[in-house]
Image (tube, coloured by chain):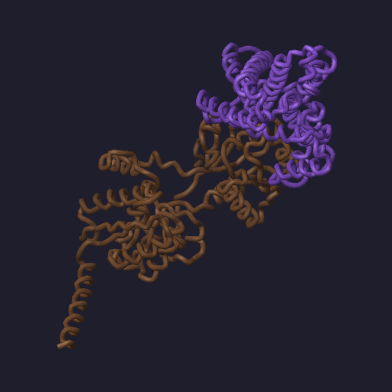
Amino acid sequence: MKKIITLIMVLLVGAGFAFANGSSESGPIKIGVAGPQSGDLASYGIPTAKAAQIVVDEVNAAGGVLGRQIELVVEDDVCKPEVATNTASKLVGEGVVGVIGHICSGATKAAMGTYNESKIPAISPSATNPALTQSGDYPNFFRTIASDDAQARTEVDFVLDTLGLTKIAVLHDKGDYGKGLAEFAKKFLEADSRAEVVLFEGITPGAVDYSAVINKIKSSGAQAVIFGGYHPEASKIVGQMKKRKMDVVFVSDDGVKDDTFIKVAGEYAEGVYASGPKDTAGNPLAKKYEKAHQDKFGEAPGPFYQNAVSATLALINAIKVAESTDYDAVTNALRTSLVDTPLGKIKFDDRGDAIGVGFAMYQVQNGVYVELK
Amino acid sequence: MDLSYFFELFLGGMTRGSIYALIALGYTMVYGIIKLINFAHGEIYMIGAFTALIISSVLGFTGMNSILILVISGVLAIFFSSAYGVTMEKIAYKPLREAPRLSALISAIGMSMFLQNYVLLAQTPDFLPFPTLIPDFKFLKPIEKILNSTQLVILVTTAVVMILLTILIKFTRTGKAMRATSQDAKMAQLLGININRVITITFIIGSATAAIGGVLISSHTGQLNYYIGFIAGIKAFVAAVLGGIGSIPGAVLGSFVLGWTESFGTGYISSDYEDVFAFIFLLVILIFRPSGILGRSQNDKV
């Protein structure tokens, strides 16, 4: 009797599997959304879930992909690595074919192994840690946001290639953001045989003046200064360099690409370069999805919304192009097929970074930042 | 590292030292008279700079000569700062004159926070641009790479202020009264010196020099916000202690020494440790001369 019961149970379980398999071939295509839906950082994760919902609704209304509807499975990881592994296992158990997420870099790293074992690609709209794409440990990882070092890369390339300057002073304000950026810039400059880092210094934010550092820049013979930090220090340095009639190009970052900088530095701001995220405001798709969000939720979208819309569009497009949900076919399509997104036409490079997403250089011209094409 | 680099750092450090000196004077004079460390003094410097910014913005519309604007806004800044300084003394320190020194010190810290937040609310938390009021002098053309006109104005103004102050203290009746009060307030009072008047004058002078410092440094850096007084105030306080708090020549010397330490430390070693150099120097001086470079040692029980 016992044996018979066992046999029946085994058969039932087998049937369950068979049913599950059957559903993944003909039922809806499941896409996971992972990120914080609760806790302190929920405001970073919820916009992504909303973005995915808006795109999926739109695709479903137009008949879905491969003749099948798409179903979203939203899971909370609270931005914590230890929770993220469970979140990933849950999504794998649900039979998702791809994941939009995770949001935080730490949680993303923790979850990627689980997805890799199950051959599931994940596209993050927000995880910026450089190692995710550069270490090679996460072959199934993609992202629609530039990595932390991309900004330094943009600045260095601009100084070396576009401006053709080689003697560079790298300054920072000793803060996490400024110093991190300056260290990347220094690393990239040192790796390039053309460039010479003539000065690498931290300055004290809020100091009465920076004349000693400016003398140092002058005597180092630098042609350009790359500064990592924020606008109050930048405007002091720029102003004092100009007052000393120094002809040194000033290149800085997102923390300086701020209208307050122009207001405070006034005439001295003219000609200063700063990197910042590419301007997507003019993109018609960005406008369209912003409006869709406004119509559906009655408010302006939150952080990483356009990146998440782009990630979802890219994944669905890859499934469409691959004509299957097979891992190799989908990841190949992500890397080869261009897709129109709010961030522009994108595809992914071998490491998983979106090509064409990232930073642009801006210059102050007649009192406004102008994007340099 | 050649000689002209050395001179640039020397003059840069001297400029910075001049600003510290203008603020440190207020600390040291107030300490000399009523033995109070007036922690709100940096805020007086900030208020001076703000007043000058407001006045010069208004005058800027009239198309007046920028030097004239600088002088008018400077004078009004001195006036306003002095008013704040005196009011502050009347509200926050006078009622506590007989109280333990710690109470007055806490009152000073409270005043500092109050003034910062008052400007933050009444004006703005943002950085504001300060107009360039000091023009480029033609005669500085040959050496402008080493010394620019703003620096020259700062150095000259500081020197003039120092000379006037020395004359005031050494050769006038008011100065004599101040010296007497500083030596022994009770005895001075017995001899018919109006102590309240002396204290008021001390606050006026201290606030006025701080306001001059505020106007000059804001023209130099071209920006200000409600918080600039805090860091400048701390540095000037360090300078006053370094030189020997209570001593006027000591405050000036301490300020220049501090300015040079920071400038040469940054120029020849690294700006990462700018503040570290300043404080190491302070420690070394205080180990060997606990009352500062020019300070008189006191044997009072505290």
- Asked if residue B149 shows in the view, the reply is no
In this view of the protein, which residue sits in the foreground, A292 or A249?
A: A292
In the rendered view, does A275 fall on the left or right side of B178?
left
- Which colour represents chain B? purple
Give the residue displayed 58% in from the left and 30% down from the top: B110
Residue A265 sits in quarter: top right
Q: In the image, is residue B148 above or below residue B4?
A: above
Quarter holding the N terminus of chain A? bottom left
Q: In the image, is residue A175 above or below residue B249?
A: below
At which x and y percent is residue A363? 55, 37
At which x and y percent is residue B247? 80, 28
Residue A6 sits in quarter: bottom left
- Asked if residue B292 shows in the view, the reply is yes
In this view of the protein, which residue sits in the foreground, B99 or B79?
A: B99
- Which colour represents chain A? brown
Q: How many marks can you see? A: 0
Give the residue displayed 17% in from the left and 87% down from the top: A2
In the rendered view, does B187 fall on the left or right side of B39?
right
Residue B127 sits in quarter: top right
At which x and y percent is residue A148? 51, 52
At which x and y percent is residue A38? 35, 51
Q: In the image, is residue A248 above or below residue A39?
A: above
